[in-house]
Amino acid sequence: MREEIDPGLAALAAKFAECFAQHDAAAAAKSVESRHVATLGAIFTALAHGDFDTAFTYLTPDTSYMLTAAGPICFQMAGEGRSAVQDGMRTNFGAVAYDEIAVDTLVAQGDVIVIIARQRGRWRASGVAFDERIMLEYLFAGEQVKRYRGWILSGAA
């Protein structure tokens, strides 16, 4: 666990419920979606503190992820199964420090949450800044994340 708190992730985690209510007039009546939004907030709170073990408790055993970035820094990460996803999360969230993540849209419908946002921060190893647009999709099974997909477009902010 990191001793410093990632301010961008901490601020984002604290705003998930507010963003959900802001972007969906019926949010208060959506109990399943509200629980999923709260779960996502708990995951990001754990990640903000570098507490990967707590974040991992919110993953199904057969979870999967895919993360694709285009722009000046292109990469693709993907994995299936809890171990592969844990490795990917450690790599991804361990490599960057977020200064700000501004949510443009947060939509929760049934077992799916989609977020469109702008994220700013820096690469931990080099200190090089980034400013990019992201689209994130989370699929839930019960109270856990079954699938995570993310698309990043650098330089599109």
Image (tube, rainbow, N blue to C red):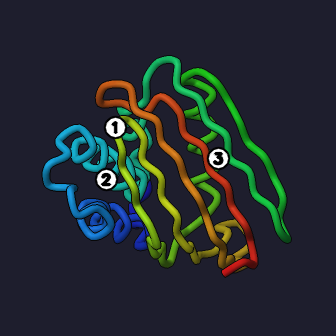
Q: Report the disc number at residue 110.
A: 1
Please, what is the three-letter code of the amino acid marked with disc 2?
Gly
Q: Is residue 1 visible?
A: no
Q: Quadrant of residue 60?
A: top left
Q: Which residue is mark 2?
A: 41
SS for dot 2: helix
Percent coordinates x, y for residue 26 in the rendering: 20, 56
Q: Quadrant of residue 23?
A: bottom left
Residue at 64% over, 67% down: 124
Residue at 30% over, 42% down: 36
- Residue closest to the eye, 85 or 20: 20
SS for dot 3: helix
Residue at 59% over, 29% down: 64
Give me the C-alpha separation between circle 3 and circle 1.
30 Å
User: Counting other residues with Cα less than 10 Å from the Cα at mark 1, is it few (<14), some (14-19), or many (20 or more)?
Assistant: few
Give me the C-alpha separation between circle 3 and circle 2.
20 Å
Percent coordinates x, y for residue 4 in the rendering: 41, 66
Residue at 55% over, 34% down: 86
Do the numbered discs 2 and 1 sit on residues whose CB atoms are within 8 Å? no
Q: Which residue is mark 3?
A: 91
In the depicted structure, whether residue 152 falls above or below residue 150? below
Give me the C-alpha separation between circle 2 and circle 1.
17 Å
Residue that extends furthest to the left in the rendered view of this protein: 29
In the depicted structure, whether residue 30 falls above or below residue 155? above
- Residue closest to the eye, 87 or 32: 32
